[in-house]
Amino acid sequence: MKMKMQVQVQATTFVSRSSSCSGPWTRGKSKKRGLRAVMAMASSELPDLSAIERVVLDIEGTTTPISFVAEVLFPYARDNVRRHLAETYASSEETRADVALLRAQVDDDLAQGVTGAVPIPLPPEGEGEAVMMLEAVAANVEAMIGADRKVTALKQLQGRVWRRGFESGELRSEVYEDVAEALRRRWRAKPYIYSSGSREAQRLIFAHTATHGDLRHHLCGFFDTTVGPKRAPASYHEIWLTLGTHHPSHILFLTDVYQEATAAKAAGLEVIISLRPGNAPLPDNHGFPTVTSFDQISI
């Protein structure tokens, strides 16, 4: 029987979708002993992961190819944001709230002299003014996407646009085969997602995979930038407090970004860096263990 559980800590909400996410953590025995032996050999330089109870996963460059995000998701949001705004602004309180949040972000950007930011007029009284306002919103969205901004206002609106694409079948996400296998069968530690994309966008990515079906029920929860920036140690400290392990080192964080790895390590988490095709190069002597596949990790 599947169980649903909602836990709210400050601005972060995550949803447990599987009965495997409830109750105390226990280490199960793998039926694939031969495979475990091979993985142990391949993972000889990894730290001892026997105490890991939770695993927190980045998406872009870790569970999903960077090329899918850069070449499919971002262009889709850029090309469809005007249609989304035009069709939903008048009738949707959700869209109006998204625009208000983006306006506040743009006001802050303008005060700081951020390149590409253009003023967004206040809510209009006439149809002509509405067109001008929504055009300014779209222009800011395009500039933010081009600069790869990791701000909540952009990510939230992007998620709304992607929702339409996924639900209509225009979009199907890519998740690495070894990731799906680890989530479905191999790993005993409870998995969570931490991404700069909104929680809604995260759920969409794992709900609508092209080759693995709906993977959401294999995930125990989702964190986004409402918990804090991914390059700030305090964000990982908050995640530890939320997940409730005895010590932060009982949480493994997997990412492709060196600065995120450094922040998580500073908060006491165990960290492994994911090496995937297209990922940015790491600094020399970065000091973190690395893997090219989740098959190398036994938790």
Image: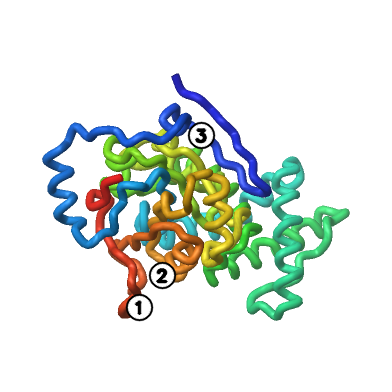
Disc on res. 258:
2
Q: Nearer the viewer, residue 279 or 42?
A: 42
Q: Amino acid at mark 1?
A: Pro
The secondary element bearing badge 3 is classed as strand
Question: Are dots 2 and 1 in contact, CB under 8 Å?
Answer: yes
Label 3 packing within 10 angstroms: few (<14), some (14-19), many (20+): many
Give the residue number, with chain letter if any, for mark 3: 16
Q: Amino acid at mark 2?
A: Tyr
Task: Give the residue at x 63% y 56%.
Answer: 82
Figure quadrant of residue 213: top left
Furthest-right residue in this view: 125
Going by the image, does 84 lie left or right of 216? right
The secondary element bearing badge 2 is classed as helix
**How far, Cα to Cα, is label 2 from label 3?**
29 Å
Q: Total number of numbered labels?
A: 3
Q: Is residue 178 visible?
A: yes
Q: Amino acid at mark 3?
A: Ser
Of callouts 2 and 1, the N-terminal one = 2
Going by the image, does 141 lie left or right of 258? right
Of callouts 2 and 3, the N-terminal one = 3
Furthest-front residue in this view: 246
Instruction: Please provide percent x and percent y for residue 265.
Output: 44, 64
Label 2 packing within 10 angstroms: few (<14), some (14-19), many (20+): many
Give the residue number, with chain letter if any, for mark 1: 283
Of callouts 1 and 3, the N-terminal one = 3
Task: Give the residue at x 52% y 67%.
Answer: 231
Residue 3 to residue 114: above or below: above
Disc on res. 151:
none
**How far, Cα to Cα, is label 2 from label 1?**
8 Å
Q: Quadrant of the C terminus?
A: top left
Task: Give the residue at x 47% y 53%.
Answer: 248
Going by the image, does 232 lie left or right of 289? right
